Amino acid sequence: MLFRENALTPNEVKYYVDLFDQDRQKWDRPNLWYPFCTYQTRNCHALVTSPEFDRLLRHANIFPLIEFQGDQPASPNSVSAI
């Protein structure tokens, strides 16, 4: 998996960590957060419960990594929350 060091600023990291925590607090089990393995939980609908995550996918430092992983060229309009 590719990783781009410092892809997000410290403020952006804080914003998305806070958003993640808010999503989990609002939609925790039994709603949309489910156990995964022995010590993790996941929300497979994060783009629905917190559409703001769509901006993370379209971020200038993240989007090229998404495009690289696909088998067809992507565009910012082809990556969507809904």
Image: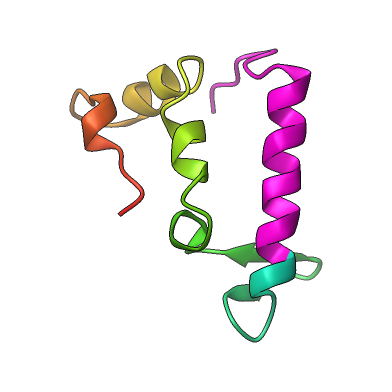
Residue at x-position 68% and y-position 26%: 12
Query: In this rendering, is residue 6 above or below 81?
Result: above
Residue at the left extreme, as displayed: 72
Q: Position of residue 1 (x, y in %)?
A: 54, 28
Direction from residue 61 to residue 29 in the image, left or right: right
Which of the pair 22/73 is nearer the observer? 22
Asked whether 44 falls inside the magenta stretch, the response is no
* Residue 6 x %, y %: 69, 13
What secondary structure prevails in the magenta region? helix
* Point 71% across, 16% down: residue: 9
Residue sitting at the far bottom: 30
Image position of 34 with respect to 82: above or below: below
Q: Residue at x 65, y 19 (%)?
A: 8
Residue at x 47% of width, y 34% of height:
55
Q: Quadrant of residue 73?
A: top left
Residue 2 at x, y = what percent?
54, 22
Query: Is 11 in the magenta?
Result: yes
Which stretch appears magenta? 1-24
**In the image, is 21 to the left or to the right of 68?**
right
Figure check: 50 above or below 45:
above
Residue 50: x percent and y percent? 53, 55
